[in-house]
Amino acid sequence: MGKGGRIACIFTPYLLTVGALICLILVALGLYKSSGPMTNVYFVKADFKDLDPDSTGLANDLLPFTKGLQQADAQGIIHDFYLIGFWNHCYGKYDTKSKKYQIEKCTDRKTRYWFNPVDEWGLDEFDDDKADGKSIMPEALDKGVSAYKKVAGWMFIAFVVAFVTTALEMIVAIAAVFSRWGSLVVTIISAVSSFFYFAAAITATAMYTVFISGVNTSLKPYKVKADLGKDMFAIIWIGVAFSLASGIFWMFSVCCCSGRSPYGHTERRNGSISRRTTAEKTPYTYERVSSPYSGARGGGAGDGATAPLTSMPQAPGGRDMAYEPFRHDGRT
């Protein structure tokens, strides 16, 4: 397989690497402003349009939180819905006529962002017992938010490392065209990229699943519900599939798809090794054959033959007629 075959061999993993990088870019360019084509790319949607903080039959341990929700809702602090993205969150109103959610504003972007419902809704202001160090939130929601806070920073770092290594993978992949050593280096970088890509994906999935579970469990009596963003997680896991597949193909290019020509042969001349290419013979062409009459000069005698037995007829000019046995001299 020559250089052309080598290029074809690495074309597939290179395209997969490009696909993985595009998915990471889409994650980063997801929801972060109130308008644009990426407003559907978010991690979580919390729906408060049917919020009823005056619901009855609530457990006693929810009463402080209930009081906070009531006062926050009365002051218009709580919005109809919240969308949590990679860098920030957005909120807005639900239009009952068009039955559509309309984003009003997005918060400033921050690294290692996590959504803090207590700060967002100002619940601390309504907690009369906050001096005791206990959270005003219900237990299930408090656990979900605490876990979310702890791993949000790690998730952000994992995505950043995955992005940097995937971009580096695309650059170094050019070296893979010329040698298997280049493929080995790319394979190592791809392994690092895939590891952090998968780690970021599994962290985000687990983290936000726990978070919405806490919201749905604790706030269901208030008619609040939360859902995962399907578009965001579809993009993430498609990117993971691209990344893992590219790593497998890069590994394949290390042990296979040599850039050397299949017709290359080595021979030793004057103590050094040189490479020459042997071309295949074209069918139905003339080639010289051994003559029983020409001895060593014709190639028919074995080692030790020193003289021809007899001479073959020669054409005018001294050319051996054995090359073209059907040649005639034009005479009738």
Image: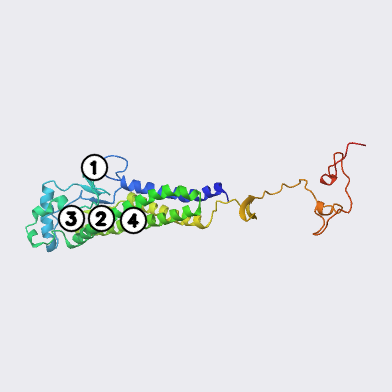
Q: Is residue 254 left or right of residue 129?
A: right
Residue furthest to the right in view is 332
Closer to the chain start, of discs 4 and 3, is 4
Q: Mark 4 or mark 3, which is nearer to you? A: 4
Question: Which residue was labeled with disc 1?
Answer: 103
Instruction: Tell whether label 1 touches label 2 (CB within 8 Å).
Output: no
Question: Which residue was labeled with disc 4?
Answer: 201
Q: Mark 2 or mark 4, which is nearer to you? A: 2
Question: Which residue was labeled with disc 3?
Answer: 222
Closer to the chain start, of discs 2 and 4, is 2
Instruction: Tell whether label 4 touches label 1 (CB within 8 Å).
Output: no
Q: Mark 3 or mark 2, which is nearer to you? A: 2
Q: Quadrant of the C terminus?
A: top right
Question: Which residue was labeled with disc 2?
Answer: 153
Residue 20 visible to the viewer: no
Is residue 235 or residue 223 the one in the foreground?
235
Residue type highlighted by circle 2 = Gly
Residue type highlighted by circle 3 = Tyr
Residue type highlighted by circle 1 = Ile
Is residue 30 or residue 293 the one in the foreground?
293
Closer to the chain start, of discs 1 and 3, is 1
Residue 80, how many percent across, how many down? 20, 47
Spatial distance from mark 4 to mark 3, Cα to Cα? 31 Å
Closer to the chain start, of discs 3 and 2, is 2
Q: Residue at x 18, y 60 (%)?
A: 142
Spatial distance from mark 1 to mark 4, Cα to Cα? 26 Å
Q: Quadrant of residue 217?
A: bottom left
